Image (cartoon, helix red, strand yellow):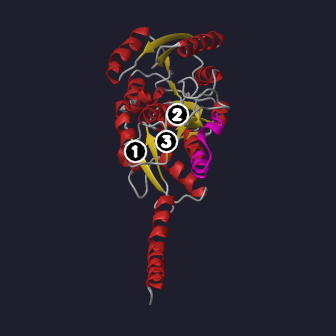
Amino acid sequence: MNRRCLCIVVVALCLLLAAPLAAEAQQIKKTPRIAFIFASTPEAELARPNPTSRYAQAFLEGMRQLGWIDGQNITIELKTVEGHPERYAAVAQELVKLPVDVVVTPISGTIATRQASSRIPIVLAGGALVEAGLALSLAHPRGTVTGLAAAAGPEIIGKRLQLLKEACPQVSRVAVLLSNLPGPMEEATRMQWREDARTLGLTLAPVEVTAPDGFETAFASIQRARVRAMVLGGSLGQLFWANRRKIIEFAAKEHLPAMYWDRIFAESGGLMSYGPDYADLTRRAASYVDKILKGAKPADLPVEQPTKFELVINLKTAKALGLTIPPLLLGRADDVIQ
């Protein structure tokens, strides 16, 4: 065999040997890795293979419905900061190093992930995207961030007060536990609270809490205000979510009917909740991930608003408070906890 033929044979053998390795490398590269950072969900509720968190279950189900099966054609990381927003930065840095192809997270995690990487696509799973300066508009988000906003508009404020008034017609003075960050949006929210309260014949007693160690002071202020009911409001929902048992126990101790924004409060012993269906939001977040993994740019995907709202009433808590919930109100509830 001459030198030229020998070279041809060697090259052919190299190509044949390299083909399986190249195909394997290509297959590995095609298996995406994504992450969902939860705000307050306990780590134990995210444990595999069967996480018990209803929000994790909703997201994983949404992914399965779109053909993405964790451990088969995709790797899904479930992370949580367990109510400690200062941990977002470290979690975001960890995910950047993995790396991941998409991050799903609430608003605080979105900010931290954007700071950690300007390239990773981010899907917001609830929050005020435009107000936080992370999108130019709902129709035209900018850069790497899109997703689902949880803001339901100012009219939901009046709706919560109205539902509380229906459940407790005798109430005239209501504490509003606020966790606001300063800014024009927060002042507009406060004005909306006051206007809606006047319409319903209610007097509001606003009380601020902006840190975990501020609840005892806030509770003392509510006690001094001599209110007959309580509503949660404000923009730092994660703070309330992480301390929900403390808030619910205070309301029970003070015999205060309370209105919350997320069903988890009613399920944990609060009287009632009305707000977006957050499990539905996390389920819908899967569709954004699917589109991005298939080549869509976050900037081209409009931000969506909540489409499902739910009223949840805890009758066991109502009984403990000596309340009889009107049948018409019970009939409108999406879920009644016995």
State how far apart marks 3 and 2 are (Cα). Answer: 29 Å
Relative horizontal placement of residue 41, taking residue 336 as reference (left or right): left
Q: Position of residue 186 (x, y in %)?
A: 53, 15
State how far apart marks 1 and 2 are (Cα). Answer: 28 Å
Q: Quadrant of the N terminus?
A: bottom left
Q: Nearer the viewer, residue 110 or 171?
A: 110
Q: Nearer the viewer, mark 3 or mark 1?
A: 3
Q: Nearer the viewer, residue 77 or 10?
A: 10
Q: Which residue is mark 1?
A: 95
Q: Amino acid at mark 1?
A: Leu
Q: Residues within 10 Å of mark 2 (few under 14, many from 20)?
A: many
Relative horizontal placement of residue 139, taking residue 130 as reference (left or right): right
Q: Can see residue 201? A: no
Dot 2 falls on a residue whose secondary structure is loop
Q: Which residue is mark 2?
A: 262
Q: Position of residue 43 (x, y in %)?
A: 36, 45
Dot 1 falls on a residue whose secondary structure is helix
Query: Which is nearer the N-term, disc 3 or disc 1?
Result: 1
Dot 3 falls on a residue whose secondary structure is loop
Q: Which residue is mark 3?
A: 120
Q: Amino acid at mark 2?
A: Asp
The span picked out in magenta is 287-307
Q: Nearer the viewer, mark 1 or mark 2?
A: 1
Q: Tags 3 and 1 in contact by the CB under 8 Å rule?
A: yes
